[in-house]
Image (cartoon, helix red, strand yellow):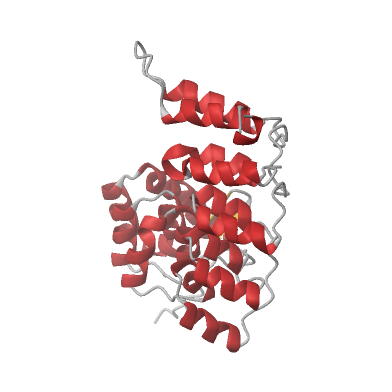
Amino acid sequence: MTEQTPNAGPTTGELRALRMTAQRLAGLVAAGDTEAVRTAVRDQPRLLSTTVERAGQDGWTPLHVAVAEGRGDVVDVLLDAGADLEARTELDRTPLHVALEHAPELVDPLLARGAEPDGAAAAYLGDTDRLAARLDSGESSVHDDAETSLLEFAALGGSTATVQLLLDRGADPDDGALLAAAQAGHPDVVSQLLSAGAHVDRRDPDTGRTALHAAVAAGPERAGLDVVRLLLAAGADREATTSDGASALDIARVAAARHRVPGDGSPTQHDALVDLVEHPPADE
C-alpha cells in the first residue's frame, strides 16, 4: 500500500503561480468582469485569500480591490464565494476601511453582509455611542488599528458629532482631517476643524496637497463652492503648490477645460470655481 504524504499545503512554486493568477484576477476585478471573476474563484477558491500590492501597500485581497474600485457587483460575487470580510492589508485595512475612504456607497452593503463596525466605521457613520464605547475600551482616539486617524474617518463621513467627540478625547485637529473634510465636501466639519486649530495650509506629506488643493480637485459637484470659500476666508495660500508643482488655480483651470462642451460657451460650475480661486471674496 502506497503511503500517503500529508497535505502540507501549496509548494513555493504553486504559491508563485497563485500569486501571478491573483495579479491577473485583480485586473479582472478592477475591470468589473463579473463572470470572469466568478469563474476564477469557483475554479480556484484559494484565490480569494491571495494578495497583491496596490499603491505601495501589500496584502490587498480581491475583495479589497473590488471595494477600492467601487465594483459592488464583483463584491457580491466574491462574498458569495466566501471572501473574508475581515481580511487585512499590511497596514491593517479591512475592506470596510477601504470603503470608508474610497467607496462610501459600499459601506452599508458591507455592513449588511456582516462587516465589523470598528472605531473607524463608528467615526465615519456618526455613531457616537459605539465610538465612545470603543474609546472607553481602550481604542486610541488618535489612530485606529489601520494606522488611519479616526478623526479623518469622522471628517470623511461628515459627522460633526464624532469629530467633536474625538477632539474632546484629545485628537489632534491638525492631523490631516481638514484635508479629508475638504475633499469629501463637508463645510460644517471644515469650519469645525478650523475653529479647533487645524492649520489651513497643512500639507499632505506624500502629495504636498493642502485642503484647498483637495477641495478644488474634488470639484464643485462633490466639494461644492462653500468649502473653497471657507478655506480662502481662513487664509488658504492660493499660490501653494503640490509635490507635482500644481497650484489650486492650475487644478481648477484644467478641470474647467475638461468639462467645457464644444460649441457651448455657457459658463459651468467649474468656471465659477476658477473665478472663486482667482478672485476670492477678500480681493473684491
Between residue 143 and residue 232, name the one nearer to us: 232
Q: Quadrant of the N terminus?
A: bottom left
Position of residue 46 measured from the top left corner of the image (x, y, whole percent): 42, 64
Q: Residue furthest left?
A: 35
265 relative position to 201: left or right:
left
- The percent position of residue 108, horizontal first and vertical second, equals 34, 65
Whether residue 197 is visible to the viewer of this picture, yes or no, is: yes
Q: Nearer the viewer, residue 102 or 17?
A: 102
Q: Pick whichever, 194 or 107, lies toward us.
A: 194
Location of residue 276 in the rendering, given as x and y in whole percent from the top left corner: 55, 31
Question: Of 278 and 5, which appears nearest the observer?
Answer: 278
The residue at the far top in this view is 263
Residue 31 placement: quadrant? top left
Against 13, residue 264 (above or below) is: above
Identify whether 1 is placed above or below 142: below
Q: Residue at x 29, y 54 (%)?
A: 73
Can you tell which quarter of the image residue 282 is in? Answer: top right
Establish if 153 lies above or below 283.
below
Going 67% across and 31% down the picture, which residue do you hit? 247
Residue at x 69% of width, y 49% of height: 200
Q: Left of 231 or right of it: where is 203?
A: right
Total labels: the figure holds 0
Q: Is residue 53 visible?
A: no
State the quadrant of the C terminus.
top right
Point out the residue furthest to the front here: 284
Q: Residue at x 48, y 29 (%)?
A: 272
Measured from the top left, where is residue 32 in percent x and y?
34, 45
